[in-house]
Image (spheres, rainbow, N blue to C red):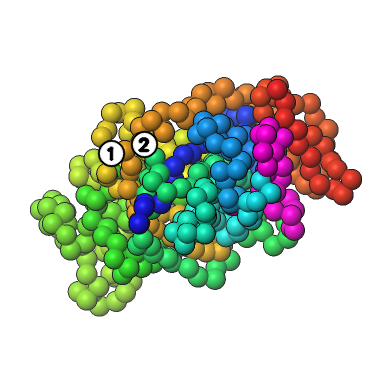
Amino acid sequence: MAEVGIDGIEIRTGKLKLDLAETFAPAQGDDPEKFTKGLGLYTSSFPDVYEDIVTMAANASHRLLDRKDLSLEDIGRIDVATESAFDKSKPVSTYVAGCLEQVFEDDLHHANKGERKFACVAGTQALDDAYNWIRAGRNQGRKALVIATDTALYERDDPGESTQGAGAVAMLIDENPDLVAFSDAQGYGSADETDFLKPNQQFPSVDGKRSMQVYLARMREAMEDFERNGGDTHPDNFALIPFHTPFPGMVRRAAALGFRHCIRGTEVEEEVADEIGHQPREESFDSHDEFLEAQKEYTETLTETEMYSQWYAQTIEPTLAISRYVGNWYTGSVHIARAAGLQEALEEGRDLTGRQLLVGSYGSGAQAEIHAETIQPGWEDELGQLNIDEQIENRRDISFDEYEQIHDVHNHAESIEMDPLTTPEGEFVFDGWGRMGERKYSYVE
Ligand code: CAA
């Protein structure tokens, strides 16, 4: 049976940039290093007045289909993953399809469209749906378009405001993919949690500190489930490990716990034992709390070793290269981590064909998913065509006053008029409201 995976990827960032250390921190009375050192974030992306989850998704998809020389006839399925939907009935994928039909000669009437919801893990779930659809042979030779698109805004003065971001990732799923092929082995960690949710509201209710604990707990369960299902998590197996990245500091924590887990009982644990001893084993402790304390100390010491630093620099750090400059893209976040890691590897001339990625997705509420991907021979050509660095570089820097207005423009409860800060060119734009309250879009040459 042919391999199935990601054949192509395109990334679209919101066109505005908020400098967190220079602009946001002083206005909020925060130390800039809270962002650069603590959270690991320098700038975040925001949509201009005429951008939203549909325009970002449609612009990424348009470039992807053009670049792959495809027509709409080639696409049999469009799934949009988002936490920022503005319509409870009509899926965002129909709005995106409407945009694409404005610029392509054929249409998408034959394509199955839907919307996936489970916080940030929904993008990965949509990839899974596409994989299953193709594997079942129901695609009739057609490809799936999976789009993760979000405008991740928090209520003003919520601690989450530091981690905002906006952008879309469009992925083409097909047989014999150019970029990565998905593994069959998969692991889940899933529980009914109330750490981050939006019960009929635009901005999330968040228990920030707890959400970090829930992330780590579900990720550990998913890792164990992956191993039970035949996945081998030896660290040498993986060239890169892209995690869901709400902010890089979160991944710094997840990576330390993940590495400790993956080396347990392996020759790597033995090798590092000369320097820092073996990992604590629960049976050697009188109480669970004492065991946890010892485990915490071991993890801290482990992260100070040369072995860990090298592993982190090679396997984790490259995956954060985009996220540091765009903030949290919710459903798209793990997918920009994959792209960032591969893009950095390409720039360094690493030969990754045939090597594996271990992908750790997470959605609040809460569910983590782990699977492996094998990097395909076409990965260098595919990654070489991304223009995300250029987009990041060209964003319009906004002042704090402009940030406040832009936040209001995208707040569904406000009706603020504001002139755009950038000029649209060769892209889909939000174009006002239709007679039934629908959002309307047009293509600007
Ligand atoms: N120099 C260096 N470091 C500093 C610093 C300084 N001057 N000031 C603060 N820091 C460090 C802090 O020590 C902290 O690091 P550690 O956690 O390693 O100790 C870090 O900077 C952040 O500082 P605070 O904890 O004081 O920041 P905060 O109170 O503003 O809250 C947050 C941070 C909880 C992440 C908050 O931004 C938030 O609620 N974010 C939204 C929720 C979220 O992203 N959760 C992540 C898991 S859930 C998920 O992944 C789903 C999703 O996408 C939302």
Counting from the top left corner in percent of width and height, residue 239 is at 28, 44
At 18% across and 63% down in the image, what residue appears? 265
User: x and y percent of residue 104 in the render?
Assistant: 66, 34
Question: Residue at 48% across / 47% down in the picture?
Answer: 173
The residue at which mark 1 appears reads as 352
Q: Quadrant of the N terminus?
A: bottom left
Looking at the image, residue 321 sits to the left or right of residue 58; the answer is left
**Would you name the residue on which mark 2 appears?**
379
Relative to residue 404, is residue 192 depicted above or below? below
Does the Cβ of the disc 2 residue fall within 8 Å of ligand 1?
no
Q: Is residue 105 magenta?
A: yes
Rendered view: 167 above or below 420 = below
Please identify the quadrant where the C terminus is shown: top right
Residue at the image point whose x is 36% and y is 68% from the top: 225
Q: Over which residues does the magenta segment extend? A: 79-107
Please tell me which residue lies in front, 19 or 242: 242
- The image quadrant that residue 194 belongs to is bottom right
The residue sitting at the left extreme is 274
Query: Amino acid under label 1?
Result: Leu
Secondary structure of the residue carrying tag 1 is: loop
Contact check, label 1 and label 2, Cβ < 8 Å: yes
Secondary structure beneath label 2: helix
Of 355 and 8, nearer the camera is 8
Left-right relation of 106 to 227:
right
